Amino acid sequence: MIETKVCVVGAFATGKTSLVARFLGGRYTQRYETTVGVRIARKQVETAQMQIDMVLWDIHGEDQFQQVQMSYLRGASAYILVVDGLRKASLVAALDLQKRVTQRIGDVPCVMVINKCDLQADWEVMEDDIAMLKAQNYDLIRTSTKTRVGIDSCFSKLIEKLTVATQ
């Protein structure tokens, strides 16, 4: 079994906490809960190759008053960038954050999720933006923490990348 630290980062109110909660088997709630600092959870995942003990760090969202504490990223083996499809500014913030994370912990496996696909008709993140990200080789998954769409795909892709990275 390997233990791996996975950080979940993005702008405020993108659905980071809900993403982690859904992956852990929790229910969806409409109530917005601000993460103060970091929330840590664990989940063991078994693949054909190995068993992984994932330590998930749900890190508070960035906003105009607060930036992600880069010290929270220390020792991370991978991370998930969460974007709110309803706010293009959260994509801009995620791309900036991704650069800073890479400077801090290097080129580790990453998956970007564009959350709230159940509300895609109202998205500010457009198909052109998504095509640009795909052209830049981002592993991109559309998710909805409300309907649970893409949650398993997000973590499966990240686990696949972690498995390759550890071989």
Image: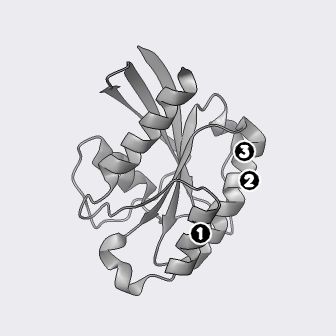
Q: Where the C terminus falls, by quadrant?
A: top right
Helix, strand or loop status at disc 3: helix
Three-letter residue code for mark 3: Thr
In the image, is residue 83 above or below residue 161?
Answer: below
Q: Amino acid at mark 1?
A: Leu
Going from the N terminus, do you reach mark 3 or mark 1 first?
1
The Cα–Cα distance between marks 3 and 1, rounded to whole angstroms, is 16 Å
Q: Position of residue 129 (x, y in %)?
A: 58, 75
Q: The residue under label 2 is which amino acid type? A: Lys
Could you say where residue 140 lies in the image, as x and y percent from the top left? 49, 58
Q: Quadrant of residue 107?
A: top right
Q: Are marks 3 and 1 in contact (CB under 8 Å)?
A: no
Which residue is tagged 3?
A: 102
Alpha-carbon span between mark 1 and mark 2 = 13 Å
Residue in front for this viewpoint, 81 or 57: 81
Classify residue 60 as left or right of residue 100.
left
Q: Position of residue 162 (x, y in %)?
A: 50, 31
Residue drawn at point x = 57 percent, y = 28 percent: 165
Q: Residue at x 29, y 49 (%)?
A: 22
Residue that numbered label 2 is attached to: 99
Q: What residue is shown at x 68% (from left), y 46% (from top)?
A: 69
Does dot 1 land on a helix, a strand or a loop? helix
Is 139 placed above or below 58 here? below
**Residue 151 location (% of width, % of height):** 33, 52
User: How far apart are the two marked residues, 3 and 2, measured between alpha carbons?
Assistant: 5 Å
**Residue beneath label 1, please?**
91
Q: In the rendered view, tell whether residue 8 sits above or below residue 89.
A: above
